């Protein structure tokens, strides 16, 4: 199954991560759902599909968001590429940051569908890779 851009749209609770990861348990990842600047997907002039995203602390503080209005060297949107999403740019202290996201759809023991995103973040040194997971099911999947 190749995930469509529509499959990624939603709010995800960050549940796992690696030490030093940009995303930490308790944070929320919004993709294209219109909240916190996570704008819906659009087709660019260069024929890329892009979607806004937001990383939000448990208290609602925005960590990184497409809607922050700050000038960036690259657009602050995720690019859809053959069933995955990616972004390359800089974090709040101007260190290189890369985010890569894939999606898995599953089923609970009771047969209810849920989706989960899995990703990596590379902050600064390319050797510093954080692997994390997030569950889109409000019941915890």
Image: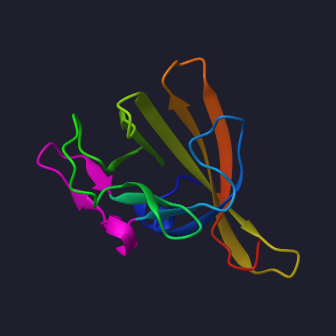
Image vertical order of residue 91 relative to residue 48, above or below: above
Q: Which residue is drawn at 38% across and 40% down?
A: 92
Image vertical order of residue 136 relative to residue 50, above or below: below
Colour scheme of this structure image?
rainbow
Q: In which quarter of the image is residue 114?
A: bottom right
Task: Please name whichever residue, 124 or 39, is drawn nearer the observer in this view of the structure.
Answer: 124
Report the number of numbered marks: 0
Question: Which residue sits furthest left?
Answer: 45
Position of residue 102 measured from the top left corner of the image (x, y, whole percent): 56, 48
Q: Which residue is drawn at 56% across and 42% down?
A: 22
Position of the C terminus, as image quadrant, is bottom right
Residue 117 sits inside the magenta stretch: no
Task: Please name whichever residue, 59 or 28, is drawn nearer the observer in this view of the structure.
Answer: 59
Image vertical order of residue 108 relative to residue 110, above or below: above
Position of residue 113 measured from the top left corner of the image (x, y, whole percent): 70, 76
Question: Which residue sits furthest right?
Answer: 109
Position of residue 125 measured from the top left corner of the image (x, y, whole percent): 52, 18
Position of the N terminus, as image quadrant, is bottom right
**What span is in magenta?**
32-51
> Is 141 situated left or right of 85 in this image?
right
Q: Which residue is drawn at 30% across and 66% down?
A: 39
Q: Which residue is drawn at 51% across and 29% down?
A: 123
> Is 44 situated left or right of 111 in this image?
left
Task: Please name whichever residue, 60 or 4, is drawn nearer the observer in this view of the structure.
Answer: 60
Position of residue 46 measured from the top left corner of the image (x, y, whole percent): 15, 42
Instruction: Tell me which secondary structure the magenta stretch mostly adopts.
Output: loop
Task: Please name whichever residue, 88 or 116, is drawn nearer the observer in this view of the structure.
Answer: 88
Residue 43 sits inside the magenta stretch: yes
């Amino acid at each position: 199954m190749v995930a469509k851009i529509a499959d990624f749209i939603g709010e995800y609770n960050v549940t796992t991560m690696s030490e030093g990861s940009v995303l930490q348990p308790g944070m929320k990842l919004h993709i294209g759902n219109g909240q916190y600047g996570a704008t819906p997907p659009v087709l660019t002039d260069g024929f890329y599909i892009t979607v806004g995203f937001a990383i939000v602390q448990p208290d609602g503080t925005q960590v990184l968001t497409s809607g922050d209005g700050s000038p960036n060297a690259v657009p602050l949107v995720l690019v859809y590429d053959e069933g995955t999403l990616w972004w390359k740019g800089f974090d709040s202290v101007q260190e290189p940051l890369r985010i890569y996201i894939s999606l898995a759809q599953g089923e609970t023991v009771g047969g209810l569908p849920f989706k989960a995103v899995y990703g990596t973040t590379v902050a600064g040194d390319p050797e510093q890779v954080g692997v994390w997971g997030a569950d889109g099911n409000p019941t915890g999947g």
